[in-house]
Structure formats: C-alpha cells, structure tokens
Amino acid sequence: MIKVGIIGATGYAGQELVRILLGHKEAEIVWLGSKSYTGQKYSQVYGNMFEIVDEECLDDNMDELAKKADVIFTATPQGLAASLVNDEILKNTKLIDLSADFRLKDVKVYEDWYKLEHKSPQYLDEAVYGLCEINREKVKDARIIANPGCYTTCSILSLYPLVKEHMIDPNTIIVDAKSGTSGAGRSAKLANLYCEVNESIKAYGVTTHRHTPEIEEQLGYANGEPIMINFTPHLVPMNRGILVTAYATLKDNYSYEDIKKVYDKYYKDEKFVRVLEKGICPETRWVEGSNYVDVNFVIDERTKRVVVMGALDNVVKGAAGQAVQNMNIAFGLPEDEGLKLAPMFP
Amino acid sequence: MIKVGIIGATGYAGQELVRILLGHKEAEIVWLGSKSYTGQKYSQVYGNMFEIVDEECLDDNMDELAKKADVIFTATPQGLAASLVNDEILKNTKLIDLSADFRLKDVKVYEDWYKLEHKSPQYLDEAVYGLCEINREKVKDARIIANPGCYTTCSILSLYPLVKEHMIDPNTIIVDAKSGTSGAGRSAKLANLYCEVNESIKAYGVTTHRHTPEIEEQLGYANGEPIMINFTPHLVPMNRGILVTAYATLKDNYSYEDIKKVYDKYYKDEKFVRVLEKGICPETRWVEGSNYVDVNFVIDERTKRVVVMGALDNVVKGAAGQAVQNMNIAFGLPEDEGLKLAPMFP
Amino acid sequence: MIKVGIIGATGYAGQELVRILLGHKEAEIVWLGSKSYTGQKYSQVYGNMFEIVDEECLDDNMDELAKKADVIFTATPQGLAASLVNDEILKNTKLIDLSADFRLKDVKVYEDWYKLEHKSPQYLDEAVYGLCEINREKVKDARIIANPGCYTTCSILSLYPLVKEHMIDPNTIIVDAKSGTSGAGRSAKLANLYCEVNESIKAYGVTTHRHTPEIEEQLGYANGEPIMINFTPHLVPMNRGILVTAYATLKDNYSYEDIKKVYDKYYKDEKFVRVLEKGICPETRWVEGSNYVDVNFVIDERTKRVVVMGALDNVVKGAAGQAVQNMNIAFGLPEDEGLKLAPMFP
Amino acid sequence: MIKVGIIGATGYAGQELVRILLGHKEAEIVWLGSKSYTGQKYSQVYGNMFEIVDEECLDDNMDELAKKADVIFTATPQGLAASLVNDEILKNTKLIDLSADFRLKDVKVYEDWYKLEHKSPQYLDEAVYGLCEINREKVKDARIIANPGCYTTCSILSLYPLVKEHMIDPNTIIVDAKSGTSGAGRSAKLANLYCEVNESIKAYGVTTHRHTPEIEEQLGYANGEPIMINFTPHLVPMNRGILVTAYATLKDNYSYEDIKKVYDKYYKDEKFVRVLEKGICPETRWVEGSNYVDVNFVIDERTKRVVVMGALDNVVKGAAGQAVQNMNIAFGLPEDEGLKLAPMFP
C-alpha cells in the first residue's frame, strides 16, 4: 500500500486527488494538508466527503510528511513546492508537483513568465515532465515529477503527432483554448463569482498566459528545435473541461488517412487518449470525470491548414488524474489503477 | 457473473446503468436494448462510452433477452414494462423496472394518475417496491422490483422516520421538490431546450404530478393508514440533482435531539443515507454522481413545524444507482458493490 | 428633471438602478456613490456601461449629496441607511432605501432578526413600506420609502388577495422561495463562486431568514391581525429571478373562478402584476429584465389547499425597478416611466 | 409611423425583433407571421409578452403583408425569403432579410455552401449587405437589405480596420468564434437539449460553416482582392453572446498606438462599436441585451501576430438589433432609435 500525502488538499485539484485515491486499490491517503483549513474536518470543507473522509486537515509540514509518505502530491500555488523541497525529503519520498515549479527546464523562463524567484533551481534538471504518454519511461525512475498544466496537457497531446512527424510548420501553431471555471481555483475572487462567470465568455491572459512556454518547450522537444506559438485561454461558464482548438499550416498535401495514421501511431495503444472517428469533434461533456483526452482533426483543403481539437477534464487528466497516472507509473502499478472511470454524463 | 440486460439503454437512466455497471465486479451487460437506436453503436449515441462500450444497440425483444440475462432493467416509458413482462420471462430472470408500472399496488390509482391502462395488473401483488432502505428484506426474494421514482425516493427517505414514529401529522405534509433537467429525459422537446430551461425556474405538474400517489402510498404504510400530501416539483437549470424541502406540523414539542435520534435509528447503519450535522442543509452538489441521499431537518419553534430536507442525484439514487442497489440485494451481493462512488465535485 | 443620487451604486441593485434610470425621461443621476470604488470610473467596475456612463464613483457623503439630489437611493448593507439619515437630509431630499432599515415598524423585531442596533428608530413611524401596489397612496407623500425585499415583494403580492379577502387560513401559509444568485450580492465569498453555485440547489437560512418577519408584518396588516408563516429561501444556479411557491389551507370550497375573481379585483388594473391564464405556471424566464410579477394559483381539491406561485426579477421588481416605481409615485410621474421594459428572453 | 411585418416572428430572432420594436417610437408591428403557430396567441408562444402583445400569429402570406407593411423582416430558414420575394412585393415595401439568402453576391457560392438552389438570384445584385457601419450609405436606398449573420458581424467588425488598412496579411486570418445557444434556434433537436449543451463546449461545422464565405466576401472587399480564412464556431453553454478571437500576422512592427489609431479612425464615431481601453478583453456579459459590439486587440511581439477580439449579443447586433438599425437607416430615422438599450448585467 502506497502511503500518499497531499499538500493543498482543499483546492479543487487536491479534492479530486482525494476522490480518485478513494477508489485506488494500492494507495491510501495519510496526510490531508491544507494551510487554510488546518484543524478542520475535511468533510466540512467538502461536504461530498461526509462519512467518507473523516480526517482533519493537517498543516503543510513537508519534512514530517516525508517521513510518513511514499509520495507527496503538491497541489499548491506556484512557488510553494519549490520552496519546501529538499534532499532529505527526496530521500524518503517521491514528489509529484501539480504546480508549475518544475515544469520548465530554464529557470529564467520560469521567472520571466511567473514573476517569481525559483527557490530550488538545483532540482530542475532531474525533474521529469510528467506527461505520461510522452515521458512514460522517464517517469518510472523520477524523484520529482512535474505534473503538466491542464491547458498544456490538452494542447500538447492534441498536436504532438503532427509536430513529432514534422507534418505541420510548428511556428504557425495557434492554440485557442477554452476552460471551465474550476481551472480558476477555489479562492474567493470577485471575477469568479457565479454571476460574473455565468452567461459570458472571455479571453484572458492574451499573449501572456504562463502555459505558453510550457507548450512551447515540450513541443519544441518533439520538433527537435524551439518553436513559438500563440496561445489564448478563455473562461467558459461550466465547471469542468478544457477544449483546445489548434490551427497550423500543413507542410504537404496530406490526406485524412495520412494524418490519421500518425495519430494512431502514437495513441492507438494509449488507454487515455481517444482518437475519435472521422468527422466527430471532441466535446468536453464526453470526458467529464474521467482521465480521457479526446482528440481529432479536420483538414482544410482551402487554406492548407489542419484544425486539431482536444478535450479533457481539467481536474482529472489536466491535474489529479494525470498525477495519479504518474504515481502509478512511478510505483510500477497498472497505469490505469484508480482511473478506470467512465466519463459521467450528463 | 450476473448477466444483465437493459431495455431503454439510451435514455439518461439507461446510460447511467451502463456507467455504473462498468465498475461492477459481479455483473456484465449482455444486452443494450434501444428501440430508437437499434443497430447503432452505443458509443455513437453516447460519446463518453467511445472505446469503452463497443457494442451495438439491440431491440427490445424481452423474450429473447430473458434467456440470456439473469436480470433485466427496464428504463422505459410508462406502460412498456407492464406490456412486455410475462410468466416465461419471470421464470428465467428478475425484472427491475425503473418505470412506474409496478410501483403502485392499486391499479386504479395507477390508471387515474398515469392515464394508461395497466397491461399486467396480475403482477402488482408480488412486485416489491424497491426502496432499499425500507424494503430490503422483501427485495431479496422478489422477481419483480419496482424501482422507486426519483422524487419519491428523496421525499420518502427524508420523511420516513418522522412518519414511522408518528412525530408529525402526516396530513400536514407539503413536499416542495426541485429537480435537475435530466429528470425530463432525453427526448427532443422544445420545453427542454437549453435556452428554455437555462436561467429559469418553474413549478410544473402542480397538484397532478404522478409521484404524488407513490409518496402517499409508501408513507401511508409507514403511518399505518392512508395519508394525503401536497407535492410540487420544480425544474431547475442544472443537469442532475433533486432537492426536497418538506414541511409538516410536529405532534409535540420535540427537541433537535429527539428528532435526531429517530433519524439515527433508521439511518445510522445505512451506507447511502447520510444524516447531516446540525445546521448543515443538504445541497445537491454534495451527492452528484453518487448513490447518497443527504437528509437533515430544522425545527421551527415559532410555527411548530419541522422543515425536512433531502438531496440526491436523480440519475443515481433516484434511478440507476438504486436499481443496482436492488440488484445487489436481490442477488446476495454486498449492497454497495459498484456503488462505492464518492460524489464528484465540482 | 429629478436629480437622483445613489449610495451603493456598484452593487448589483445599484447598477440596475443605473441601467433603468438611463432610460428614464424625467430623472438624471447626479451622484454614483460607492465606498469600495471611490475615484474609479464606473465603467471600469461595470464594463457594460463603457461609453454610456463616464462618471467616476463618489463616496457616500450623504449630507453633501442631499444638497444636490431630489431623491437618494440607498442600495447598501443593512444598517448603513439608518446610520446616515438625519433631519437635515430629509428636508432636502426623499430617501428610497433598498436595505431593510425602514421596512419593519417594530425596532425590536428588526434588531432580533438582523442582529443590529437600529441607529435611527425615530424615523420608523413615518417610513412608508414601498410595496407600490398595496401602499401607493402613502408613498405619494413619504419622505422615507422602505423599498421591499425581493423575496417579500414576490411572496406578499402572490398571497395578498387571498389573505386580504380571508380566503385562506393565514397561519397555514408556507412560502418556499427560490432565488437566482444575484440576490447574494457582489461580494467575493467562496460560497458564491461559480463552481460552488453551479449545478446545485440548496435551502439556506431555514426558519431564520430575515425576510420572514417582513412578510408576516405586511400580510398581517392585510389579515387584520398578526400571522406567522414558514419561509424557506433556496439558491438556484441562475443569475436573476425569484420564484415563490406558497401553500395555504382554503377556508372554504372555493372554485377557480372564486379565487380568480379576487386576484382580478386587486390586480386587474395593475400594470406590473400579471395574473396568468388558467393552468399556466409562472416561470422566471418570462419576467427577466422587467418590472413584472407573474402570479397564478392551483386549487388542490384533495387536500383543500391552494398552491400560489409568483415570479419576478429580483433585481428589477425585487429591487431597482420597484425603487424607481416608488420614485415615480412619489414625484407624481407616470408609474411606469422608465419601466416599460419588455422581459428579455432568452 | 412605419408599419412593420415580421415573417418568422416566433423564432428567437423574430421575438427579439418584437421586443425591440415595442420600444421603438416610429414603428409599429402590423403582422406577426409564424407558420408553426398560425392562429395562436403570440403571448402563448412567448410568455414574456403576456399582456404586452395581444395579437395572434398570422401565416406568412407575404403578398398580402406587403400591402400593409412599409417594411418586412424575414427571420426565416435559409431559402424562404428568396422563394417569397417578387417585384410586386418590392414595389410596396422594403425587405430586411435576416436569413442568408441575399448576403452572398455569387449565387454559386451560396448554392455550394448552403446546398440549396437560390430561387431569386435576379435580386442578388441590388441587395445591400446591411453591415451598417460599413455600408451605411448603400442601405439608405436599398429595397432589399441582407442582414448579416451573427458570427459574420462580429468577425468582420473586429477585423475590418486592419484589413482595410492592409496592416495584416489577410490570408493568415484565423477566426475562432464562440456562440451562445440561442444561435442554434428554437427547434426541438436533441443536440440542443439542456443536458446536452450544459457543462460542455464543442466546435462544430469545422471548415464548413456557412458564415465562412460571408466573412471572406466582405473582408475581401475591404482588402481589395479575395481572401481565404479559417473560421471555427463553437457552442457555449450560455443563452446569448458571441465572442470572436481572431489571429493574423502583422505586416509590420506596428505599435499599440498604430493599431489603436486605425480602430479609432473607423469606429470613434460609431455609437454601437466600442473600442475598449488598452488591456481590456471583450466579454459577452458586457453587451448582453444591447446592440453594442465591443472590440479590442493585443499585439504579440513574440510571434508578430495580432490577436483581435470582438463580442456582441447574437440576438441583437447579430440579428434583430442590426435589422432595426438597418430599418432606421433605410427610413431616415436616427440610427439608434429603439436601440438605446444599455446592456443588462448580470
């Protein structure tokens, strides 16, 4: 039984970790860390957990936690995981960080986009970017797994085969992404009030969203050299779900079958990536509550562009689900343990 | 392995049966019946099931199905189950009917409220009303289990202890219920279009809703003699969830503890009924996706009434979940097999 | 041209006052008061007002404001209006208070339910309860108009004819009310975040909501002696709208026509109260954005109760619209000036 | 007083025409045409109009209507207006067609994209594309005004200044658009049911949406030669609103001020186009219920692209509002008569 500690257990991603791990046969939660709710019963913070989780929230004493846990999930604001981790902790436990602290290899890029000083750049080299489908082998032995961002998981997996196989001009990539509101977190901000979000859609962080360099770095690896893209996130009046619509210019007159073949090449054996049938567009409702990413594409023969679409549940494959998938890989368990969740509809 | 057939597999309740049974260790689906989609792949009707359910929809040939299945769920319009069932079928299989056909013992009441002729009244006597927490023992040996309605499950479980213990005047009961829109089913009606339901709330079926006699019959049994109530359903702009707010006059000056004690008496050992802590009102978000019913009450000392509240997921405990719970009981399995679903939030 | 000042112009009700007054031919806004946003452009707080309202927010200096304005609307938290008003102000201007400070005649009832000391009880006697359809004559000469609460406007207007004509037993009244989330105001509270409200419904303030004594007081006047009711509000995932479903025992075997007649007696000539046709239930979508209240009723012959329903837009007839209606009456203008707004759908 | 007839008065756009015209001082509705509801009271189809519109729906006898009306709005399915119009009608009345029948000059393009035979191509030449801000002068004398599509109005107005001034490479334009569900119309389709749309987002009509050639044609005129773009619409779980996010490569190193200047050049004096302040992204909530289009842009210095955003209410500026604006122009009235509607929030 793997002993799991969670720092930031009362955010939406933290709570989803709890939900998923409750159904995991090989893991048990030993530490529900929450700075804001220390000492309160977890089920008073999340009423869904009443009579299911009886524990109280603990503080975020990571040193003590490291002695008790085989793995620590940090579902915390940017900067916290980097400020808490140290060699002693990493001797005892693995760290799966759901924040952005260990996702970017270049500390300067991190500090430029996040406007934060990185507190433990010495670990950047060894940290593995935990996009399971791409980096599965590296995850197996990692001490620090940087769990990818929600937008980035969806964007990268949608575009990866085309970039990897050099079928598109990577510098023409434009990613137009739409997210449910749980992505904004559970803090009491006016902009996230029901009446402010409901019945509206907006772009935000235009040209400046922090997931941009993360997508660029990972797709750059696939491409073999750096790329630069446009990424625009939007806030959608729904709880969960991310939809990515991406555009890029094709390098040749590829047919549907040509492109389908490379998607199948990379994803045919992937349980959690579903390449949809021809003509079916991904919809977030079909992945809600599950770890699936649905992808598909349409060729525009008029403009020689391909329109690539991907959908996932930002709280699951975009956060907690992928974190558990990483844990499964890192501990040699079946990759889908605890994640055999059929999407819930409606 | 219990072989399960579903008639009406492409309605919302039918699809939820599929979702739940996918996670059930002792059951496998052998028949996905759908009159409207016969011959189509199930995953083309419900995209969430892509690469999960590969089967095509079959017709609703119940005679043939009865030879293959140990249990048949009918998630069909009123009248259909009663018209299909016969002795031959019941020799081979159990029937768990999610429609109203076998819920009311009095065929005249059925025909009055449903404006339908009952096609097999000869089975009404033996049919067991499958409200698990109340009729568990009878369910064990039943051939026909009448799965309760969504509103009724919530209403009855919320009020049962008070009626059973004669703490309220049952003829003062007023049930004001609110339901998510999945309760209206998956048929293409103008009134259920997104723009017609969104940003609005209304009452409907005022004084005439068919769940009224069902609540009255069952609470009448608890009371020891017939009762008459007011029941008003409302349509709420959300997918899932039912909230019941019920009012009744207390027969005595009961304290919080007095009433809490009787709720605990009936529900303390019930896994799926959660009596909330003092002062906490049930909210549908805390039960979504799960088989839980959350109940609580507030005494109004000014008016000598008690306000009782209950919340459940209409598609789970109000339909498919309770149906599986009934199956588990009827086949001697752990009652929560396949139903250990923590509510999903947000 | 009536000069209007608004204190609390950046709350939802304050902003709706602005929207309505922009279309009012006889009124102009001279003061947009907002403690939180003093010095900021109003259109930066409410982007809908960009290029429509160019003014900056001012503070809540009511003494100065009273010199400039013919009427002051206070759309402020409970207690503020009572703490600011004085004789000097009332010499110069009329006060239309959208808070509860002057609604209840009995200062003790106010202090009990609001847990606040009343700072100017000396004005309670002269303050007029501004439920226009009932108190029109008194509003004409009032210096202080207590604009009714949203729930109360809907509850009282729905039930008034039956109470006034003694057709129901007033002590059997149960009001089950449902409100959109704008009723919770524009403050950054976790409970009002999009993901917390969306896809859920709950009761709150059960037996303790402050609109209870307000309904009781006003219906008590109609009844001729005090009454006591149950009132339960619910939070619904929509922006605007209140639906009231009320229950009461009929005193006699009244027919539909008997009851229809008394509704027509009181409301036939009321522009803003629409008694719907037989069998049509009020729905909040049909009044959104307008000053209408839609009411109707169903007799339950089985239980001898009447089910009364009312729907209004909580921000308009439940707040800003009624406040403008009161202003129109108090200044001798056509009652519907600025309020000829057809409900907006969808 | 202008006499107005509406064909298709019971669709969402038709009903919005009614709402807007009720507040129009110089127009009165003389014909509420609705094939589906002929003979029924309009207020039974749209409950918001109860006691406001007393008329019954009439059929779509356009010949008779033309004798009574000065202007006819056709808010009808594609193909109907073209099949009904004739010289006799046009002698008596102006036609403002909200369908696509007269938007595209090239009948072949129409027939290719709409898969319909055009029944009156002889009128295509004289028909004026009623994008008021661009074609105001031509609208003044037109007999047939082709009211632009919702997506197209938003897309064209957002991009027009940049294309007209040749600041972007028009063949790099990618328009990613998001629409509320009222855009899907009021017909009872399974795909538009509340539970199917709610809590989900999807792209549709990818590379094939019929508004594509309309945008291309109009922007082609601005450009001076034909262009080809990508256009992808998405369905968003909200009632009203369209947001366009468009991408294009800048032809030079333009500064914010350079681009702002051309937006101001074209829109400074336009009442209904609001160029937002620097850094403010358009949001559909700020235009709801009004005839405004909010536009803004962000330069991405990294990729040399500009991200252009536009927001409007698809039922108003995207349909009925612009139709009334066209009527005002065509009849020499103040362009904003009946359209001085401040956006309603929340």
Image: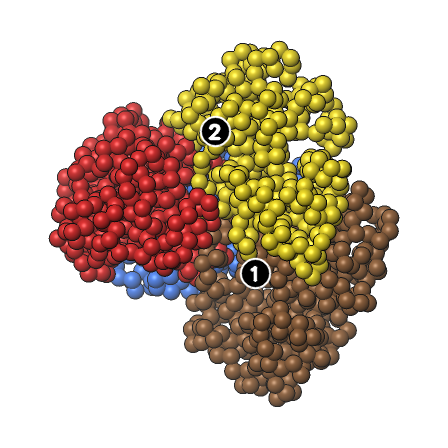
Chain colours: A blue, B brown, C yellow, D red
Q: Is residue D225 left or right of residue A19?
A: left
Kind of residue indicated by mark 2: Pro
Q: Who is closer to the viewer here, A335 or A277?
A: A277
Which residue is denoted by mark 2 in the rendering? Answer: C334
Question: The N terminus of chain C is located in which quarter?
Answer: top left
- Label 2 secondary element: loop
Q: Is residue D316 left or right of residue D137?
A: right
Which residue is denoted by mark 1 in the rendering? Answer: B183
Name the chain under label 1. B
- Say above or below: C11 vs A255: above
At label 2, counting other C-alpha atoms closer than 10 Å, the crowd grade (few under 14, some 14-19, many 20 or more) is: few
- Say above or below: B216 vs D43: below
- Say above or below: D316 vs A138: above
Disc nearest the viewer among 2 and 1:
2
- Say above or below: B103 vs B89: above
Q: Is residue C30 left or right of residue A8?
A: left
Kind of residue indicated by mark 1: Gly
At label 1, counting other C-alpha atoms closer than 10 Å, the crowd grade (few under 14, some 14-19, many 20 or more) is: many
Residue drawn at point x = 22 percent, y = 46 percent: D95
Tell me residue A300's x, y (percent): 26, 55
Tell me residue B297's x, y (percent): 76, 50
Is residue B74 in sight in this rendering? yes
Q: Which mark is residue C3?
A: none
Is residue A186 in sight in this rendering? no
Tell me residue D312's x, y (percent): 36, 39
- Can you tell which quarter of the image residue D27 is in? top left
Whole-angstrom CA distance, mark 2 to mark 1, is 45 Å
Q: Who is closer to the viewer here, A23 or D145?
A: D145
